[in-house]
Amino acid sequence: MDAVAYTDAAVIEFVNKNFIPIRIPASDSELAPRFLIKWTPTLLILDKEGIAHDKNVGFFWPQELISCLLLGMGKTYFDKPDRTKAIACFEQIPTSYPRSSQAPEAIYLSGVAQYIEGHDVANLIEIYDRLKSGYPDSQWLMRADPYRLLKKK
């Protein structure tokens, strides 16, 4: 990723604004086993306590890397729980990167976070509807399929 993604100006700006990047070689005898790093690149999103909230293995193009990082940030906020910030991260993905492979998962998690906050089943139904219309071949539509049953007939 050094040759393409990490040299992209938008990626550099996004990472510098939102992260403290650390490079851990797969051969690192202490950290590689701790974070189960078996292959590079492995992208981990850690919180300030060093707890991993997201892990991805393999190469990303610049646009996919930013959406991947946004998804990891959202998952970190979701776990904290800071649902408002999580939803903002998740919603930025389908808005700014609608063709990203992370967009369907972001829609799913945004709806789940909204449901947890307000217990409004309309949020679950909206997950299904958004995925059905925008990402009909996504595994996330399959995961949201039970929510279609919540629609009133």
Image: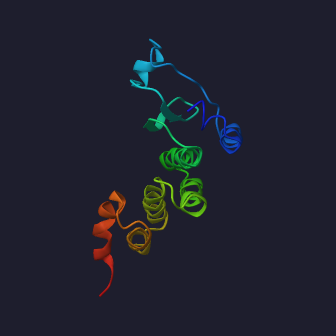
Residue 146: image location, x then y, percent: 28, 68
* Residue at point 48%, 67% (across, down): 118
Q: Which image quarter holds the C terminus?
A: bottom left
Residue 103: image location, x then y, percent: 48, 58
Above or below for 28 versus 2: above
Q: Quadrant of residue 35?
A: top left
- The residue at the far bottom in this view is 153
Between residues 69 and 10, which one lies in front from this camera angle?
A: 10
Between residues 16 and 113, which one lies in front from this camera angle?
A: 16
Residue 36: image location, x then y, percent: 39, 25
Q: Which image quarter holds the N terminus?
A: top right
Above or below for 73 versus 39: below
Say left or right for 149 vs 28: left
Color encoding of the figure:
rainbow
* Residue at point 32%, 70% (across, down): 147
Say left or right for 14 vs 86: right
Between residues 93 and 150, which one lies in front from this camera angle?
A: 93
* Residue at point 41%, 67% (across, down): 131
